[in-house]
Image (spheres, rainbow, N blue to C red):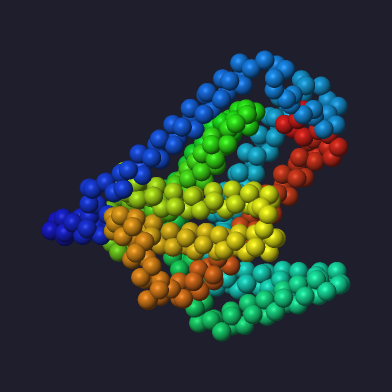
Amino acid sequence: AGTSSPMLRRLEYRRFGHTGVYRDVTFALLFGLQLVCVLTIAVVNGGRVHASPAGSLPPPPPPLGALEPPASASRLSAEMLLILAVASGVAALLSALWLVMLQTGARSLIWSGAALATALALANAAWLFSLGGAAGTALGLASFCLCLGSVAYLLYHRSFLDFSACLLSAVAHVLRAYPATLALAAAAAAAAMLYAVLWSAALAATAQLPRQAAASSLLLLSFFWTLQTIKAVVHATVAGTVASWYFLSPHVPPSPTKRALRRAVTTLFGSLCLGALLASSLQTTRVLSRVASRHAPCGAGVRSGCLCVLGFVDVLLRFCNEYAYTQVALYGKTFTRASRDTWTLLVHHSGVEALLQRDLVASALSLGCAAGGLACAALCGMWGRAAFGAGSALWWQA
């Protein structure tokens, strides 16, 4: 063990990005700069709004049907925060239960997710047929054909199910063996919420001032870029943890999640920021194009076609980014090299298999998301109706 530990350590350093070289530093600096810009916009525009005369800004909209006195706002807010806290706890428990189910019955969950998707497609087709008319019949027939195609696709590629079930079981085992990955996801959600508060303050102040198109566009790009970067850091950290477990077991170094996170926020952070910038730029372009298309002189068909192409490119880019982030996390590559290697891997080797596995795994994960989301929504809805009533003002309008 004494002679093998240094060798394993050197192998780990070579394999999992321990190069000590900071990649794509320029984009890490740009990411920090845009956060400073958001903070500056929030402070400057917020100060301008507060310094403006009372009559120069439009008054806030009155509460819709608010009959309770303003003094009840604190009580309603506390009640709503309690509901959200309990719902978060329920969601955490359901997630833990789902991990256990994935480890023991991944194959059944994949089939269940596919069956649910098929049932929803059939229900959608039946609803469209019930509408009648040429449009309803055509759309219903298209939905029915897609349903049949999905069933045929699943039956034809059922040989992939065993491997997909093995993947899900292994991932569930790793998440249970290294709970720090779950803590990382919670910390990332908290960081995203804190940023959302800052971003909302900046946007609220900017929206009340004239001639702020540039600032609004920057805020939109910053919103997508920051959230994409947070997701990229989580993705790279989990990828490094799984890689350590897969390649180095049973000699996994202590705290692999902490090591992977340290790399993700230091030497690899610039590469992750670059990938997130590309994805966020395309998302921003889609939003701005959708807004501009409402006033464009071209026909609706041309606008829809252009937006459809942008949507397809957006999905393709984010799909490739996931594999590029994994190569960045494992091998410490720059993002451009990781993207080239990912494209070569998908086009010339296992691209079709990767798409198939992703689709099969997504059916089980989507089923868990839908079940947990519906349970939490039902809990919040019933509790909120009992606490606030059906006809009272919304809690933030009281």
How many tags in the picture? 0
Location of the N terminus by quadrant is: bottom left
Give the percent coordinates (x, y) of residue 80: 70, 35
Q: Is residue 318 above or below residue 180?
A: below
Which residue lies at the image location 63% right of the left edge and 32% below the top edge? 207
Q: Is residue 189 left or right of residue 386?
A: left
Residue 27, image x and y in percent? 36, 44
The answer to whether residue 153 is above or below residue 84 is: below
Q: Quadrant of residue 35?
A: top left
Q: Is residue 192 visible?
A: no
Q: Is residue 62 above or below residue 353?
A: above
38 shown above or below 86: above
Q: Residue furthest left?
A: 3
Q: Residue at x 73, y 50 (%)?
A: 378
Which quadrant, please, contains the C terminus? top right
Q: Which of these two is toward me, 131 or 286?
A: 286
